[in-house]
Image: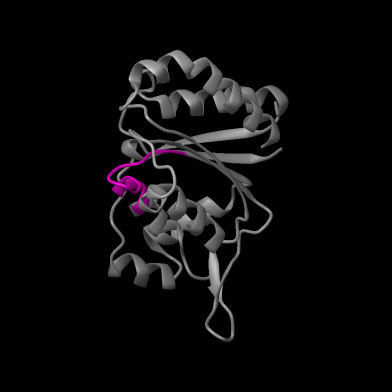
């Protein structure tokens, strides 16, 4: 049995959010093939996620406090699903705040003798489901930091098996997005089967 953590980083309800609908579909399709696996949903907007501060860092170094608790709980999972919109070229602040709490020295990464960080969560998987209001093709793709940051931070903690699906133009072409959404869900199904 694998344990999966699904992190929801949008304040929208499922019926208002393409990201949440894709995530729901991904989970449904995944569980068809992995009936014994357990998925925990963590909706960040239902939790009191605070910003990282000195107290969190000091407490964590003493094996106590919120950062210590969040990081240790996070590392128990085998797979991660992240559902997030792109906001202002990046991720929502609440997702960044959560990630700051789980990226903890000696729990999810460590420093080697040369001071170089090494991720401690090898042999785990992550799948990112993102949404964007517009499109960011080359050459403006460098502006979109949402996927870049998530992929980089998961690699930092040792998760190299990272896949993603980003649905673009949901605000720019809403009619087209709605019409093509069944095809989008088919793509999501294919990703879920390989997760």
**Horizontal relation, residue 49 to residue 142: left or right:** left
- Residue 151 picture location, percent across and down: 51, 53
Task: Please identify the quarter of the rendering in which residue 10 is found.
Answer: top left
Residue 131's x, y, as percent? 40, 34
Magenta segment: does it hold 68? Answer: no
Q: Is residue 122 left or right of residue 151?
A: right
Q: Residue 57: x percent and y percent?
A: 36, 69
The C terminus, quarter of image: top right
Q: In this view, does 14 lie above or below 59?
A: above
Q: In the rendered image, which quarter is residue 113 located in?
A: bottom right
Residue at 38% x, 37% y: name it: 135
Based on the picture, tell me whether residue 92 belongs to the magenta stretch: yes
- Furthest residue toward bottom: 114
Q: Identify the residue at the far top of this view.
A: 179
- Name the quarter where the N terminus is drawn: top right
Q: Which range of residues does the magenta coloring cover?
A: 83-96
Coordinates of residue 61 in the picture (x, y in percent): 43, 73
How is this picture coloured?
one colour
Residue at 33 percent of width and 53 percent of height: 97
**Residue at the far front in the pictured view:** 139
* Residue 156 against residue 27 in the figure, above or below: below
Of 25 and 163, nearer the camera is 163
Q: How many marks?
A: 0
Q: 81 left or right of 46?
A: right
Residue closer to the observer: 68 or 145: 145
Image: 192 above or below 163: above
Is 194 in front, or is 99?
A: 194
Q: Looking at the image, which residue is at 48% across and 58% down? A: 153
44 relative position to 117: left or right:
left
């Amino acid at each position: 049995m694998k344990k999966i953590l699904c992190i929801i980083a949008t304040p929208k309800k499922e019926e208002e959010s393409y990201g949440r609908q894709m995530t729901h579909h991904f989970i449904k399709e995944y569980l068809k093939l992995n009936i014994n696996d357990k998925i925990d949903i963590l909706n960040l907007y239902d939790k009191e996620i605070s910003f990282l501060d000195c107290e969190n860092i000091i407490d964590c170094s003493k094996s106590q406090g919120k950062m210590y608790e969040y990081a240790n709980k996070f590392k128990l999972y085998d797979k991660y699903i992240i559902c997030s919109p792109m906001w202002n070229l990046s991720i929502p602040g609440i997702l960044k705040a959560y990630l700051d709490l789980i990226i903890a020295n000696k729990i999810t990464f460590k420093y080697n003798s040369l001071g170089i960080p090494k991720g401690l969560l090898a042999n785990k998987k992550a799948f990112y489901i993102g949404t964007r209001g517009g499109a960011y093709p080359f050459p403006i793709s460098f502006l979109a930091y949402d996927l870049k940051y998530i992929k980089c931070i998961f690699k930092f903690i040792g998760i190299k098996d990272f896949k993603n699906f980003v649905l673009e133009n949901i605000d720019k072409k809403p009619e087209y997005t709605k019409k093509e959404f069944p095809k989008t869900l088919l793509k999501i199904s294919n990703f879920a089967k390989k997760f």
